[in-house]
Structure formats: structure tokens, C-alpha cells
Image (tube, rainbow, N blue to C red):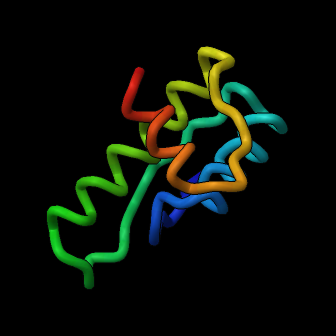
């Protein structure tokens, strides 16, 4: 399965959770839209990969506020 990451926001995190809830052994290749600034793309890619790792550790939550999500991801 491949997810196209356009932005590592709450909707992306919910999509990652939904996929892994269906198949916890799924492999997710995180791609991104190359029209954005490279540093922005790196940030999104890193956040998405961090979210996948947190999910596998049972630590990924659902968020209504994106700032809360970013704070949790980066404090790990």
C-alpha cells in the first residue's frame, strides 16, 4: 500500500491509523508531492514516518487540534 502524503496533518494521521487498524503488518511507503519546498517535504515525510512508528508502539492518538499532534510527535 502506498500513501501520498501531501501534508502531515490530522487527516493524514487518521488515514495512517485506518490502514494500520485494518492490517497492522501493512507496509506504507510515504511519498510526497514534489511541488513543495524540499524542507517542507522533509518535515512532512518525517512526521508521517514518526506517526507510523508511534502507531506501532500503541502511542498514536487521534487529534482535533493539529498543534497537539505535532507536540506529541516531536516529544518522542
Q: Is residue 50 left or right of residue 15?
A: left
Q: Name the foreground residue: 11 vs 5.
A: 11
Return the x and y of residue 75 as percentages of the image width and height. 39, 25
Q: Residue furthest top?
A: 57
| Left or right: 5 in relation to 27 | left
Tell me what residue is drawn at x 78 percent, y 33 percent: 23
Residue 45 x, y percent position in the rendering: 35, 52
Find residue 41 and report its image quarter: bottom left
Q: Residue at x 61, y 21 (%)?
A: 56
Quadrant location of residue 15? bottom right
Closer to the camera, 45 or 30?
A: 45
Is 50 on the left-hand or right-hand side of 10? left
Q: Residue furthest left?
A: 38
Q: Residue furthest right?
A: 22
Residue displayed at 56% across by 37% down: 27
Total numbered labels:
0
Q: Is residue 25 left or right of residue 46?
A: right
At horizontal 54% and vertical 34% (from top left) the residue drawn is 52
- Front residue of this view, candidates 61 and 22: 61
Amino acid at each position: 500500500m502506498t500513501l501520498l502524503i501531501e501534508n502531515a496533518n490530522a487527516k493524514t494521521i487518521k488515514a495512517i491509523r485506518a490502514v494500520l487498524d485494518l492490517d497492522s503488518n501493512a507496509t506504507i511507503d510515504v511519498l510526497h508531492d514534489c511541488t513543495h519546498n524540499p524542507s517542507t517535504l522533509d518535515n512532512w515525510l518525517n512526521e508521517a514516518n514518526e506517526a507510523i512508528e508511534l502507531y506501532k508502539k500503541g502511542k498514536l492518538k487521534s487529534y482535533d487540534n493539529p498543534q497537539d499532534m505535532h507536540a506529541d510527535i516531536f516529544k518522542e
